[in-house]
Amino acid sequence: MSDIPTRRLGRTGIEATVLGFGAMELRGAQSGRHRRPITPEQAGRVLNDVLDQGINYIDTSIDYGTSEEYIGEYISDRRGEYFLASKCGCLVGAPPVAPGERQPHVFTKENIVAGVDQSLRRMKTDYLDVVQLHSSPSMATLEADDVVATLLELKAAGKVRFIGASSTLPNLAEHVALDVFDVFQIPYSALERAHESVITEAAEHGAGTVIRGGVARGEPGAGTGAEDVWAAYERADLDSLADGASRSEFMLRFTITHPDLSTTIVGTLNPDHLAENVAAVKKGPLPDDVYAEAKRRLATA
């Protein structure tokens, strides 16, 4: 049994480890803006290490290149050990896009159902624990394509257990107000706090909150384009509050200190980084005084 702390994923009743795994890192060199080669051996090693460390929430997407196939290949035989979330609206059969471009998303019933069916085949499972709308579609899109009805049909058919949305403002607020989504995936970190209050709003509506970007897309120099974001860390002099911890550890603990967070997904291919992230969340949230001071400094940074 894992000794990573767990939190209730809203009304789903799922007890998710506070640290989840973001499987975007398994997308390979043919998909995404920041493309890195990955071998099957690397994928199998990190996925099994994730489960061996006790993490029980894995998030992926049709858009994430080879990610779903690797999950199916290497840990489908351990399906009872983790909750599995993927996404829909991603265009099934779309070719890889050029670096810096985004994949198209289509929310017709035909494409959503085809996407879920493809995910089930790829990951060798009979059901997804959560399927999330990808790319924060507008309310006009949801209404035009009767998207919620399609998701509820998939739920009734047993192909998905819960429905959610990977959303950002301004559409996120409208998605929350619908009171139909069980889970929201929301970007948030100490350095990108625009969604801080809407995380609470989502939780107040009974939804689980899955936070992405909780360590600000990696530390400076990681090749993620995060340098401008990390300038705020410098201005706020958060190193002086970290008590010798790495910046990634401090950021991760800041993220899980949000009282309405259910889990935060962090991706890596590096076993050492994975172990460091697990160790960080086991330390728990930041002390109240450190958290308050960090927020005070960031507000004026």
Image (spheres, rainbow, N blue to C red):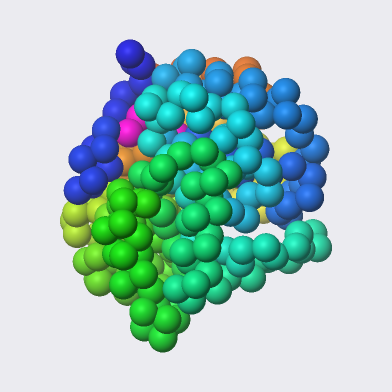
99 or 79: nearer the eye?
79
For the record, the magenta segment spans 16-20
Q: Nearer the viewer, residue 84 or 301?
A: 84
Q: Using the rendered image of the protein, determine whether residue 154 is visible from the camera's viewpoint.
A: yes
Q: Residue at x 63, y 50 (%)?
A: 64
Q: Is residue 169 above or below residue 240?
A: below
- Residue 27 percent across, percent down from the top left: 68, 44
Instruction: Name the spot of residue 273 as percent of width and height, x first.
Output: 61, 23
Front position in the image: 39 or 248: 39
Can you say which quadrant of the picture contains the N terminus? top left
Count of all numbered marks drawn on residues in the image: 0
Membership of 202 in magenta stretch: no
Q: Which secondary structure class fits the magenta region best?
A: strand
Percent x, y of residue 207: 25, 53
Residue 41, image quadrant: top right
- Tell me, yes or no, if residue 290 can be seen here: no
Kindly identify the residue that appears in the image at 37 percent across and 27 percent down.
80
> Is residue 83 depicted above or below 211 in this figure?
above
243 over 288 or under it: above or below: above
At a point 26% along the width and 37% down the height, the residue shown is 14
The residue that appears at 58% across and 44% down in the rendered structure is 122
Quarter residue 259 falls in: top left
Q: Position of residue 91 (x, y in %)?
A: 61, 67
